């Protein structure tokens, strides 16, 4: 594959936007909800990348402007054998670069890396702000955000009831346990559940009733269930009374 200077330059210029996107994605980690994959050609992701690129380059070009102004005002400038302003070098197709040295290339690449690092770090930090988190979780979790908000306190947890396609004696195998992790697909539908302290039982659906058939057995410490084996899933938020009492006493 031949080298494409245009593609290479485009990636360099988009680096701050990619840093913004990566910072927000890294900061949105949740112990309960796994990250949903990005939709191919997502307009929102493209907007975030373009906006981040503009912000990063505005910051760096502003820094160059301040540096040039301070240099002209004080008259004390460090003389180098190349143009340190990477934007002027790019826009003039290198005509303003002079004779580039090895240090020139290092300076230019560090200059292009700097806004990406700054924007990415700020985005990671900002992802923890309440209003940013609410916007992100509304877009990422969809209908599940209400349940995440209800289960957010340390003394609350989500119980999931899962009826599967597995059958035994004309009844469906079902599981009930604490939701440790929920993975969503790009349509915000549940595609995978991880349950702890899981109880297994049978559900028999009749014309006039739904019967639950329990059996004596030890709880399953941890189980992963895939959406391809679901018939339906029900979620319910519970409060740990003991934890709530301990918190009140403290």
Image: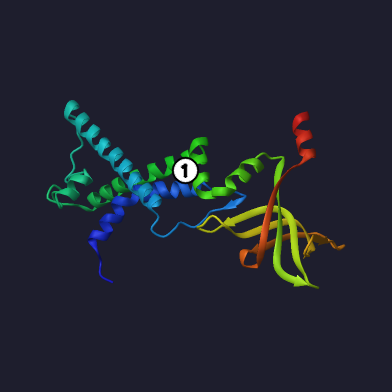
In the visual, does 166 lie left or right of 127?
right
Q: Residue 155 location in percent, x, y?
A: 72, 40
Position of the C terminus by quadrant: top right
Q: Residue at x 30, y 48 (%)?
A: 112
- Residue 114, visible in the rendered structure: no
Please, which colouring scheme is shown? rainbow
Density class for disc 1 (Cα within 10 Å; few <14, some 14-19, many ≥20) is many
Residue extending farthest right: 216
Q: Residue 36 location in percent, x, y?
A: 52, 55
In the visual, does 99 lie left or right of 152?
left
107 or 163: nearer the viewer: 163
Q: Under tag 1, what secondary structure?
A: helix
Q: Residue at x 65, y 41 (%)?
A: 150
Q: Quadrant of residue 2?
A: bottom left
Residue extending farthest top: 73
Determine whether 211 is above or below 126 in the image: below
Q: Residue 239 location in percent, x, y?
A: 74, 41
Determine whether 97 is above or below 164 in the image: above
- Residue 117, visible in the rendered structure: yes
Determine whether 150 is above or below 193 in the image: above
Position of the N terminus by quadrant: bottom left
116 or 82: nearer the viewer: 116
Q: Quadrant of residue 203?
A: bottom right
Q: Residue at x 78, y 29 (%)?
A: 249
Q: Which residue is mark 1?
A: 124
Q: Residue at x 81, y 61 (%)?
A: 211
Q: Residue 243 location in percent, x, y?
A: 76, 38
């Amino acid at each position: 594959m031949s080298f494409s200077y245009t593609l290479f330059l485009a990636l360099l210029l988009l680096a701050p936007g990619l840093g913004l996107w990566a910072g927000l994605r890294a900061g949105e980690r949740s112990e309960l909800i796994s990250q949903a994959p990005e939709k191919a050609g997502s307009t929102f992701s493209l907007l975030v990348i373009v906006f981040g690129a503009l912000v990063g380059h505005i910051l760096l070009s502003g820094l160059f402007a301040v540096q040039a102004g301070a240099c002209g005002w004080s008259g004390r400038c460090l003389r180098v054998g190349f143009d340190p302003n990477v934007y002027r070098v790019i826009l003039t197709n290198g005509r303003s670069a002079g004779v580039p040295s090895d240090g020139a290339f290092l300076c230019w690449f560090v200059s292009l890396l700097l806004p990406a690092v700054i924007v990415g770090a700020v985005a990671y930090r900002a992802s923890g702000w309440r209003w940013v988190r609410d916007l992100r979780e509304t877009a990422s979790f969809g209908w599940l955000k209400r349940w995440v908000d209800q289960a957010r306190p340390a003394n609350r947890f989500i119980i999931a009831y899962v009826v599967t396609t597995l059958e035994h004696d004309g009844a469906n195998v079902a599981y009930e346990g604490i939701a440790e992790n929920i993975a969503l697909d790009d349509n915000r539908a549940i595609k995978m559940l991880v349950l702890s302290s899981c109880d297994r039982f049978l559900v028999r659906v009749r014309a006039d009733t739904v019967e639950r058939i329990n059996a004596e057995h030890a709880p399953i410490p941890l189980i992963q269930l895939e959406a391809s084996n679901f018939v339906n899933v029900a979620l319910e938020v519970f409060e740990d009374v003991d934890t709530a009492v301990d918190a009140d006493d403290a």
